[in-house]
Image (cartoon, grey):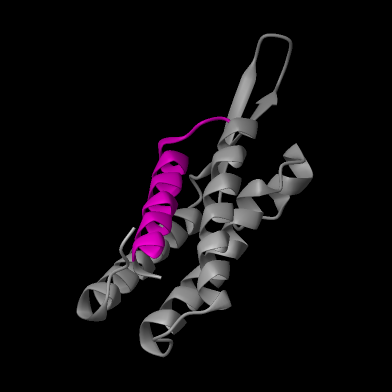
C-alpha cells in the first residue's frame, strides 16, 4: 500500500486528529456507556455514564470504556505531534498505528460487555476511521 506524502499526509493526519477529538467529545458526554441494573425480578433500569467515569469499572467490572478514553487522549496527542513535528516516522509511527488499533478493539469490546448505544457505535466508527487514516499516512 502506497503511503500518502506531503500535503496529503498532513491532511490525513489532521483529519485523523479531528476524528479522534470528535470521539473524545462523544466519550465525555454522559450517554456513551450504558449500564443495566436489575431493580427486581422483572425490572431493569438503564443508566448512562461517560467513558471517563471510573464508576463504570466499579459498577460493572468493565474497564474498557475508561481504558478506551485514556488511550484515545494519548492517541490524539501523538497524532498531533506527528502532524506538526514528525516528518519521517520510524518505530513511533508503528506504535501510533498499534495504539489506534488497540483503541478500536477496546471500544468494540466495551460495547459487547455493556449495553449497546448509538454513541458507542459512533465512537467505535470514529476510532476506526482514525486507524484507517493513520495506516494510509504513517
Coordinates of residue 21 in the picture (x, y in percent): 40, 66
Looking at the image, residue 79 lies above or below residue 20: below
Coordinates of residue 124 in the picture (x, y in percent): 45, 46
Dividing the picture into quadrants, the one containing residue 40 is top right
Residue sitting at x 42%, y 50%: 128
Residue sitting at x 43%, y 57%: 131
Coordinates of residue 43 in the picture (x, y in percent): 65, 15
Residue 134, magenta (yes or no): yes
The outermost residue toward the bottom is: 85
Residue sitting at x 35%, y 68%: 137
Apparent side of residue 56 relative to residue 112 in the rendered image (left or right): right
Coordinates of residue 115 in the picture (x, y in percent): 57, 30
Apparent side of residue 52 relative to residue 100 in the rendered image (left or right): right
Dividing the picture into quadrants, the one containing residue 134 is bottom left
Residue 53, magenta (yes or no): no
Magenta residue span: 115-136
| Relative depth, front residue between 18 and 94 | 94
Amino acid at each position: 500500500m502506497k503511503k500518502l506524502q506531503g500535503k496529503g499526509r498532513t491532511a490525513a493526519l489532521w483529519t485523523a486528529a479531528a476524528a479522534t477529538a470528535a470521539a473524545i467529545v462523544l466519550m465525555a458526554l454522559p450517554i456513551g456507556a450504558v449500564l443495566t441494573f436489575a431493580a427486581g425480578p422483572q425490572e431493569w433500569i438503564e443508566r448512562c455514564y461517560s467513558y471517563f467515569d471510573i464508576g463504570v469499572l466499579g459498577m460493572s467490572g468493565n474497564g474498557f470504556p475508561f481504558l478506551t478514553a485514556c488511550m484515545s487522549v494519548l492517541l490524539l496527542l501523538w497524532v498531533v505531534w506527528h502532524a506538526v513535528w514528525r516528518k519521517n516516522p520510524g518505530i513511533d509511527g508503528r506504535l501510533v498505528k498499534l495504539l489506534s488499533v488497540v483503541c478500536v478493539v477496546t471500544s468494540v469490546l466495551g460495547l459487547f460487555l455493556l449495553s449497546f448505544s448509538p454513541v458507542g457505535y459512533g465512537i467505535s466508527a470514529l476510532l476506526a476511521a482514525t486507524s484507517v487514516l493513520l495506516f494510509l499516512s504513517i
